[in-house]
Amino acid sequence: MHEWRPVRYPPGPLRSLNWVVYHSGKESEDSHSPQQTNTTQHQGNPASGLPLKPLSCKTTLTEVQFGPMKLIKDPLQVLLVFAKEDSQSNGFCWACEKANFRCSMTRTPESALECFLEKQHDLVIIDHRHSRHFDAEALCRSIRAVHSSENTVIVAVVKRPDREEASVMPLINAGFNRRYVENANMMACYNELLQLEHGEVRAQFKLRAGNAIFTALEQSQEAIEITSEDQVIQYVNPAYESIMGYQQGELIGKEIKEVPKSEKNKPDLLETINSCIRKGKEWQGIYYAKKKNGDSIQQNVKITPVIGQGGKIRHYVSINRPLNDNNKNDKTSERVQAESQTDIQSTKHKDRRKGSLDVRSTTSRGSDGSSQRRHSSMARIHSMTIEAPITKVINIINAAQESSPMPVAEALDRVLEILRTTELYSPQLGTKDEDPHTNDLVGGLMTDGLRRLSGNEYIFSTKQPHHIPSNLITPLSLNDIPPRIAQTMENEESWDFDIFNLEAATLKRPLTYLGLKIFSQFGVCEFLNCPEATLRSWLQVIEANYHSSNSYHNSSHAADVLHATAYFLCKERVKQSLDPIDEVAALIAATVHDVDHPGRTNSFLCNAGSELAILYNDTAVLESHHAALAFQITTRDDKCNIFKNIERNEYRTLRQAVIDMVLATEMTKHFEHVNKFVNSINKPLAALEENGGNCDEESVKNILTSPENRILVKRMLIKCADISNPCRPQELCIEWAGRISEEYFAQTDEEKRQGLPVVMPVFDRNTCSIPKSQISFIDYFITDMFDAWDAFADLPNLMQHLDNNFKYWKGLDDRKLHSLRPPSE
């Protein structure tokens, strides 16, 4: 839904054109004040300086018919991007004036992008004739990267060819809709604008209005199904999913005849329906549909053929309503039902994780029908001065509601309710009885506890000093590593590297030894300009502050995450995206990401009223502590201060990157990080690949190396490294599953002893099914995230391990076994 604002011309002398030139990236606003010398106002003919015949400056609204919808359109907003004023730019200025369009002129790509983000022009005309001034195609791609440019028409002004006609494909690939061969004749410019207005611009305006229709479909409480003329399913709305029990991805692309039918219908009913609708007639009646679970449901069905191009039937729209729906005429009841229906949808799906994101629809891994599923994607929203992006979105929707039909306005009410929640990225779960393992995992990993203090608070003192044990003070040398330890690290570049062998060989000190080798391979000492002895001391003090008493969150886990991080950093796409400072930050973040972990979850600490929870206001408690402590123990002693020799600004950049990555391991933002990665990186890359197979290297580079996307890559990298256990070889996966289960069992035991709320009741050592807990963890957190990461970094071996491990746990669960291994083992 887009906002259209009437053009308000300032009072005073007649101004047939009100346009603005942007200088040095800043807009010079039109004003009556003569003091604003950097504003260029044109009255009369901007090309000749002669006064024009006065045109009415009254805003003219145009009515556009879009099916049964009557759309009201303001005069066009046009953005002209010309590095220098010449007859061609003046010709378009005059044409805009004559057509009564609102026009902005910019001179640089930066000011053009800034102007577009503010005004959201309908038409952008870019000078493509002089590459020495700016790269017109790069500017076009930058505008296209903004989500709101989807319905903007962009025109390239090109030189008149000397000899052979050049191909327009480079322009199309850059995002231009059409080209205009230079012609400064004013009537030629005027005619071009008129053709654009009544052609591409009007078509895009109608497509924009289609968003409102889809919003209404998505919010409708009636089950709606749209099929092609060959009766291939092309769309079902959420109400259909909820009523029938299917997910959209299970139906899209299937023929109607492939969907199971109820036996309760009369044998010839389907033939009667098809005979009617194929003649272009509407059919309405009672029909039994078969739900996914096999139950039959009686519905009042209306099937309408849609006549399209060539006067032929192009679609069939089926509207299905269960017969017990008696509230259709009650507006208030209808609204309440629509809201409750949305809630039901999020709880009834068998595979709840799909309610948040279907990553496979954006990658080549999902070439089946699920790729057609419509997803709510993250838009790139640019803020203005003080107003927050989400506030701007809400204001736009509020304004749109004022002129929208009642059904659309009511649907937008529901949109506003969702936007005003704080958990925009976390999918809603089913009831606790449906999947207690998933609910308990989410409760334990994605919430900050129940905030209930019992009086017997659990104390983790933030004032305890952290020392290097005396037996670790003598630094090791990379050249002095004992042969048995060196031998266990020979294959550390392989994903199948066994960290538990190294743990045994080093007497539970794998982080120091593996860190020395990996940091050496990546040249960390050279980058930080620090001696190897300082790095060795730092690794030792960090490892000393991991708790070896924890079954899972100990230095072996840190070494495992460091190994995964190094492995991912060697992948080609990752190397293309990150700079050396990013690689160093990632290795440091992996090393320290769980330092001083107490073996309890954030929820436990908040419920227990621990000092850490109080210090960090129950928000990202452990992750904040890990990051803060890592820098405290690094910088307080020169012997282990690996940052002491780097320049201040470089240190600040490195520190910020490390903190951001450590905080990204906190699970409450899991779905936010994955969604942003998919929508900002995976989808644009997939779109480039779909446009002809041979990706424009410059476009790929722009996506991979933008500062915002580099942050998303680093977050995704450490998140995947942190919870990569299900993607390890099966024996390693089983060992990690046993360790994390034991840590959760110990937490449940302590919660019961202290009378604290039990955060994850299914993790009771006497009743817990470890296979079920692993299946839930993989389904809810792992599969979508690693599908996205695999699409980016190309990790077929990890995905094969994940598939094997899921089948292993599923096999145990099918046999009703609760243990790590079958009894025979």
Image (cartoon, rainbow, N blue to C red):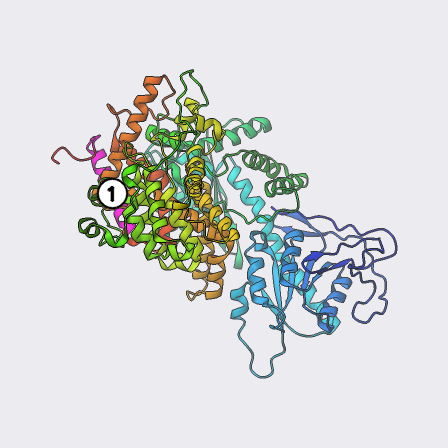
- Measured as percent of width and height from the top left, residue 231 is found at 41, 49
Residue 813 on the magenta span:
yes
Question: Can residue 219 be found in the magenta stretch?
Answer: no
Taking depth in this image into account, of 534 and 171 the one nearest to the observer is 534
Q: Residue 540, position in %: x, y?
A: 32, 43
Q: Quadrant of the C terminus?
A: top left
The outermost residue toward the left is 824
Residue 729 visible in rendering: yes
In the image, is 179 to the left or to the right of 759? right
**Could you tell me residue 788's position as x and y percent?**
39, 49
Q: Is residue 122 left or right of residue 492?
A: right
Q: Residues within 10 Å of mark 1 (few under 14, many from 20)?
A: many
- Read off the residue under disc 1: 805
Query: Relative to residue 379, is residue 199 depicted above or below?
Result: below
In this image, 629 relative to 557: left or right?
A: right
Instruction: Please report the residue visible at 74 percent of the width from the left and 63 percent of the height from the top.
Output: 96
Q: Which residues are magenta?
A: 798-819
- Residue 735: horizontal and vertical position, in percent? 23, 38
Say whether residue 232 is visible: no
User: With 34 as the anchor, is 770 left or right in this view?
Assistant: left
